[in-house]
Image: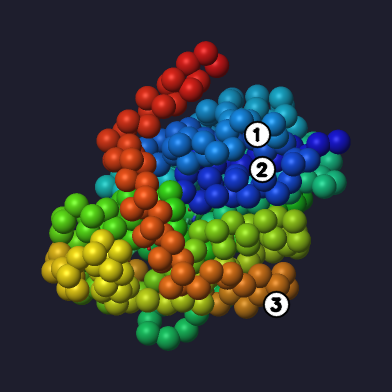
Amino acid sequence: MQKKLLITGGAGFIGSHVVRLFVQKYPDYHIINLDALTYAGNLENLKDIEHAPNYTFVKADITDAEAMSELFATYTFDGIIHLAAESHVDRSITDPNAFIQTNVMGTANLLSAAKTTWKNNYEGKRFYHVSTDEVYGSLGATGFFLETTPYDPQSPYSASKAASDHLVRAYGNTYHIPFVITNCSNNYGPNQFPEKLLPLFINNIRNNKPLPVYGDGKYTRDWLYVIDHARAIDMVYHNGKNGETYNIGGFNEWQNIELIKLLCVKMDEKLGRDAGTSAKLITYVKDRPGHDRRYAIDANKIKNELSWTPSVTFEEGLSRTIDWYLANQQWLDHVTSGDYQKYYNTQYAHS
Ligand code: NAD
Ligand code: DAU
């Protein structure tokens, strides 16, 4: 019998790569992609697989508890990979409530629908929550986040993700829902909405606009190519132990300003501009309030237990990423203008 797998947030950045991987790798699974198509969700990301026989798109909002119950009753999913979220820290600072609604209440609705539908028959079932390293808070100059590091979220975004992680564990502990959680570092790659650092800066360089570096630029992040995150999700979904948490990271720390300087060099090369042209766009601006100084993941558990390691070097991933944005300027123009909504309306006009 065909397995029915719900992937939430599948029209977003990471979700679209996860949906594509599962649709192509597992033809015997029926992949149901649920997405509300907020500003960050874009069906253009999945044009290449939208007609695959094992793929269904459902436009729905996870904050709608009734809609979630009905969807679960219709499909009785075998598993859920839950990525749908408000995901941008800066937006969480201006509008925290949207994050509480989607990330906390939305996750609670999915857990409740799973519990009701599975009715204590958890054989072969799994609830997988895709979370972030930001739940652990901010590190000083040394040390790494381990799976056992106490939660210490500092932004409304990370607090909402921490709350949803806690809810997933509580449903596991109280109702025995089989779950797994992963906490991943900063992703980069094709299809990322150009409000996050790398796509924003690539787009700005392309348009000769200033590159707004927050504060002193000495904030540190660990960067992972999105395809390697999708591979890790595949491995954890299939082979991770119930009730466990796995940290995922790129073993690849960069201070923002060093990363930005490298990006400028690469962009000059790719655009055929004189060396130093893009770096002139670097502009220091007011810092993000409550800005976490450093994130660094210890990803040895997933490496040792599931034999996952990143497959794409940072040099290769960055080069592929820049090439993708330069080759897909129409995609960038669509998502920045909202034109992709027209695509959706035409595509689903009769559904
Ligand atoms: P994204 O913002 O690109 O995509 C989020 C998707 O969720 C969009 O398609 C959006 O339409 C959908 N969505 C939002 N609210 C919804 C709602 N109420 N109902 C249904 N769908 C809704 O995010 P992303 O960067 O792809 O992140 C995906 C997940 O991975 C998130 O849970 C995020 O916390 C987590 N994560 C992201 C990163 C990263 O670097 N981007 C790192 C670690 C973890
Ligand atoms: O660590 C995982 C997290 O990474 C994910 O959970 C989030 O969903 C994802 O958005 C990302 O969060 P960050 O806040 O780290 O990503 P962002 O791209 O917004 O910023 C990366 C760093 O660059 C951060 O230190 C802030 C800085 N920055 C960002 C922007 C957008 C700037 O200096 N200027 C900018 O304009």
Q: Give how far apart the Cα atoms at labels 3 and 1 are.
A: 35 Å
Compared to residue 247, the image places residue 78 above or below, namely: above
Q: Give how far apart the Cα atoms at labels 2 and 1 are.
A: 8 Å
Of discs 3 and 1, which sits in the foreground? 1
Q: Earlier in the sequence, mark 2 or mark 3?
A: 2
Disc 1 crowd rating (10 Å Cα; few below 14, some 14-19, many 20+) is few
Which residue carries the number 1 mark?
52
Name the quarter showing ligand 2. Answer: bottom left
Disc 2 crowd rating (10 Å Cα; few below 14, some 14-19, many 20+) is many
Disc 3 crowd rating (10 Å Cα; few below 14, some 14-19, many 20+) is few
Q: Residue at x 50, y 73 (%)?
A: 313
* Circles 2 and 1 in contact, beta carbons < 8 Å: yes
Which mark, residue 304?
3
Amino acid beneath label 2: Val
Q: Residue at x 57, y 63 (%)?
A: 228
Which mark, residue 23?
2
Q: Residue at x 40, y 41 (%)?
A: 40
Asked if one can make out residue 234 in the rendered structure from this viewpoint, the answer is yes
Amino acid beneath label 3: Asn
Q: Does dot 2 land on a helix, a strand or a loop? A: helix
Q: Does dot 1 land on a helix, a strand or a loop? A: loop
Q: Give how far apart the Cα atoms at labels 2 and 3 are.
A: 27 Å
The quadrant where residue 216 appears: bottom left
Q: Which sits in the foreground, 218 or 73?
A: 218
Compared to residue 106, the image places residue 290 above or below, namely: below
